[in-house]
Image (spheres, rainbow, N blue to C red):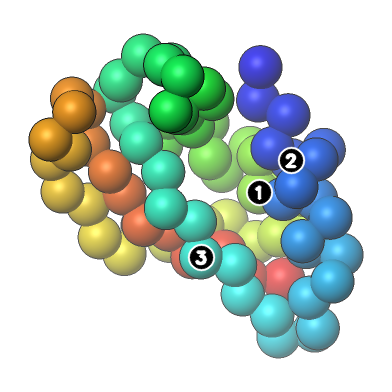
Amino acid sequence: MYGLAAGPLGRLAGWLGPQGRVVIVEYDGRPANRWVPYPVPRARLPDLVRRAGLKPPAITAERPSAYGGTMYVAVAER
């Protein structure tokens, strides 16, 4: 279900330079649907970025989503 670390996030981390950063915008607390088929809960994000070879993420912002749950912004560094 959370193939983000092995898939796109892992590939993206491989392209980063030594001081590279990834900004992640995701949903928390909402079920999957056709527009957001694999929302990544905040609680799962640290494990995903670690498996992708990145340092623990910092949540920099969040807000309620008009469609349920919340949206959050995280930054993870190489």
Identified by mark 1, the residue type is Val
User: What crowding class fits label 1: few (fewer than 14 Cα within 10 Å), some (14-19), or many (20 or more)?
Assistant: many
Checking the image for residue 63, the label placed there is none
Look at the numbered disc 3 and give the secondary structure of its residue: strand
Q: In this view, does 75 lie to the left or right of 67?
A: right
Q: Is residue 43 at least partly visible in the picture?
A: no
Q: Name the residue under label 2.
A: 5
Q: Position of residue 4 (x, y in %)?
A: 69, 37
State the residue at coordinates (80%, 84%): 18
- N-terminal of the two: label 3 or label 2? 2
Q: Name the residue under label 3.
A: 23
Which quarter of the figure is the N terminus placed in?
A: top right
Look at the numbered disc 1 and give the secondary structure of its residue: helix
User: What crowding class fits label 3: few (fewer than 14 Cα within 10 Å), some (14-19), or many (20 or more)?
Assistant: some
Asked if the residue under mark 1 is in contact with the one under mark 2, i.e. CB atoms within 8 Å, the reply is yes
User: So how many labels did they put on this image?
Assistant: 3
